[in-house]
Image: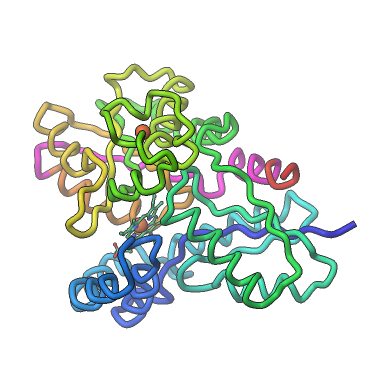
Amino acid sequence: MSERAILLANLGSPDAPDTPAVRRYLNQFLMDPYVIQLPWILRRLIVSLLVLPTRPKSSAAAYQSIWWPAGSPLIVLSEQLRDAVQAEVAMPVHLAMRYGNPAIESTLLEIATNPAIKEVVYLPLYPHYADSTIATSIDEAERVIEEHDLDLKLIIPAPFYQEPDYIDALYQQSLPYLSQPYDHLIFSYHGLPESHITGSDPSGAHCLQRQDCCQQPHPAHATCYRHQVMATTQAFAKKAGLAQTDYTVAFQSRLGRQVWLGPNTEDILTQLAKEGARNVMVMCPAFVTDCLETLEEIAIRGKEVFVEAGGESLTLIPCLNVHPAWVSTLAKWLRQA
Ligand SMILES: C=CC1=C(C)c2cc3[nH]c(cc4nc(cc5[nH]c(cc1n2)c(C)c5CCC(=O)O)C(CCC(=O)O)=C4C)c(C)c3C=C
Ligand SMILES: [Fe+2]
Ligand SMILES: [Fe+2]
């Protein structure tokens, strides 16, 4: 019988919080055709002329504000997750990053050095489908296997955005926070250009054609990020007994001039403060590990926006990270895959 290994994949971080390392990382990230979905020449021009001259410096400063002695929070937490899962499963558990290190390529090559391993349970660590996360991670792993002619078969679990165990883990992680007094809860998901949503609609005629498209059952939802984040939110709200007036869904991390999913998290923070909210909670279920986008964009910059608009406190509910409920859920899925 063939043996299996597990490969967990996350997005990745620069190797260091300095401008040259962030420039290399952004160049690899934004030249990915799944991320900036334009022909190569346009992508090259945008990245080289509009992004790389200025963003590496400002992003490096942002990374410096959240960097830990052991490294990038996203990498350190992902390594801790790998080790915690390893303690619960009999198969070897590896970790790779789509951008930066450890790369998917070097990690698959390392797995392939064990001739007994024929199958790899490959789990990109994103609850919701997006071309720029799950699809690109799968594409990269398939490219490596084909290019190096590796005798490995990938077993890929489906997006887990509404799996009851995932919702339960989110609930358990957030319970100590949501049992404190607060005025409003924001579900802040990473944003996407609307063109990514319509572009991954296989019917070409459903997504974003009407405001409530995500509430109407449709096969396009298998690859609709907006539908999937709405489903996570609704399942969580039901589990936590939240009324619709208790929370708002918003999207963060806009980049560039395209139309992105809305509403924008910063606009919602400003609006809530102006309407009289003083204490808000923010949870970010699109990320399973804390990272730049939660620790800096929400907990530092989001808080500044909220306080400037008249609010008092913004509390970031940590991501699942290495919560025991999440670790045992992952271990169970990976054993059963
Ligand atoms: C067109 C640009 C981007 C798309 C589309 C995008 C989608 C997307 N990203 C995440 C998760 C993360 N993104 C992170 C950082 C980050 N994202 C973009 C751009 C797009 N993301 C950039 C340029 C950056 C780098 C930092 C910056 O300069 O702003 C991170 C954090 C990485 C870390 O090191 O901590 C995560 C995680 C998802 C889930 C997603 C689509 C749903
Ligand atoms: Fe991103
Ligand atoms: Fe939809």
Q: Which residues are magenta?
A: 308-332
103 vs 261, left or right, is: right
The image quadrant where one finds ligand 2 is bottom left
182 and 326: which is toward the camera: 326
Residue lying at 31% horizontally and 69% vertically, measured from the top left: 64
Tell me what residue is drawn at x 65 percent, y 60 percent. 7
Residue 117 shown in magenta = no
Q: Observer-nearest residue: 261 or 241?
A: 261
Q: Position of residue 217 (x, y in %)?
A: 45, 24
Q: Is residue 266 left or right of residue 148?
A: left
Q: Is residue 326 visible?
A: yes
Q: Position of residue 282 (x, y in %)?
A: 32, 38
Residue 281 visible from this viewpoint:
no
Q: Quadrant of the N terminus?
A: bottom right
Seen in the picture, residue 24 relative to 251 is either above or below; the reply is: below
| Quadrant in the picture for residue 114 | bottom right
Residue at screen point 76% across, 76% down: 113
Instruction: Return the x and y of residue 300 as percentages of the image width and height.
Output: 25, 53
Residue 187 image-quadrant placement: top left
- Looking at this rendering, what residue extends furthest in the right direction? 1
Q: Is residue 183 above or below residue 142?
A: above
Q: Is residue 139 left or right of residue 23?
A: right
